[in-house]
Image (cartoon, rainbow, N blue to C red):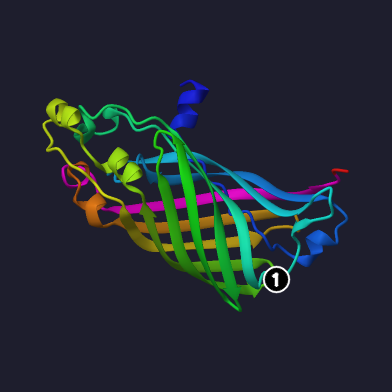
Amino acid sequence: MKIRVLLASAAVSILPLAANAGEEDRLSGDDIVLEVGAGVAYKPKYEGASRYIFSPQPLFKLHFLRLPNGYEIGGGSDQGFGFRPAFAYRGKRQAGDAPILTGLGTVSSAFEFGAAVSYRWDYLKGFVELRRGFGGHEGWVGETGVDVILDPTPRLAISVGPRATFASSDYMQTYFGITAAQSAASGLPTTTVGGGFKTVGIEGELRYKLTDKVTAITGAKWERLIGDAASSPIITGGGNKDQFTVRLGLTYKFGAKLY
């Protein structure tokens, strides 16, 4: 299999870029502190699929950055408001991925870029994230949630909480709608899907520091399609409203001087 085909079918998971990641990072003397690694996820072939696949997952997290003008990102208390960039990747969806997709054509892979705002108070943290798609779709996608964050030991961190995702009509029509031409080719009814909430669910993550620099990460997520997305013939005719993801990975933390 060609490398580009593998990458197109893989879901790239990018760890949240922390706006507040610890005083020790700011005091390290480095201008940038990063956490990079790799993992694997077992997840649906495409959103709403019944078929599951293993996908490689690059992992990345920015802990601290000192800019030339002296401005610093990260390196403080994790309490209060936070801001971070947000990224996502969606693999190509092809007619051959499932019988229900026959006649619907190909949806190219898409990259999503945006930002997230969060607020943490003690052991509770809420966030809202919004991303704009480029490539396979040109719509907007968002996610919101609240986590309970626990640190049973200095090396172990656990977070878990509810999630909800929403999307614009452009996104929803791309992945759950059926045009007149697609209807004629597939035999499925013409379907127009509006924007709004598309999933609700729950997500949990466990991070364990094997050393000061190496961290093992495991996570699980359940989502259920709702509203227009759930009632699309693409889902009712051969998909699954319930979507599960399990992931494992290892990361390495390091710093460097830039100036």
| Residue shown at 37% from the left, 58% from the top | 222
Closer to the camera, 54 or 133? Answer: 133
Percent across and percent down for residue 120 are: 59, 72
| Residue shown at 35% from the left, 40% from the top | 46
| Residue shown at 18% from the left, 27% from the top | 181
Q: Is residue 254 above or below residue 72?
A: above
Q: Which residue is mark 1?
A: 154
Placement of the C terminus among the 4 image quadrants: top right
Q: Amino acid at mark 1?
A: Pro
Asked if the stretch drawn in magenta spans residue 242, the answer is yes
Percent across and percent down for residue 221 are: 42, 57
Closer to the camera, 138 or 39? Answer: 138
| Residue shown at 60% from the left, 61% from the top | 207
**Residue 156 sits in quarter:** bottom right
**Residue 216 sits in quarter:** bottom right
Residue 152 seen by the camera: yes
Q: Say left or right for 106 vs 58.
A: left
Q: Which residues are magenta?
A: 235-257
Q: Residues within 10 Å of mark 1 (few under 14, many from 20)?
A: few
Instruction: Name the outermost residue toward the bottom.
Output: 122
Percent across and percent down for residue 145 are: 46, 65
Residue 47 seen by the camera: no
Percent across and percent down for residue 114 are: 53, 48
Closer to the camera, 39 or 165? Answer: 165
Mostly what secondary structure, the magenta segment? strand
Q: Is residue 176 above or below residue 166?
A: above
**Under tag 1, what secondary structure?**
loop
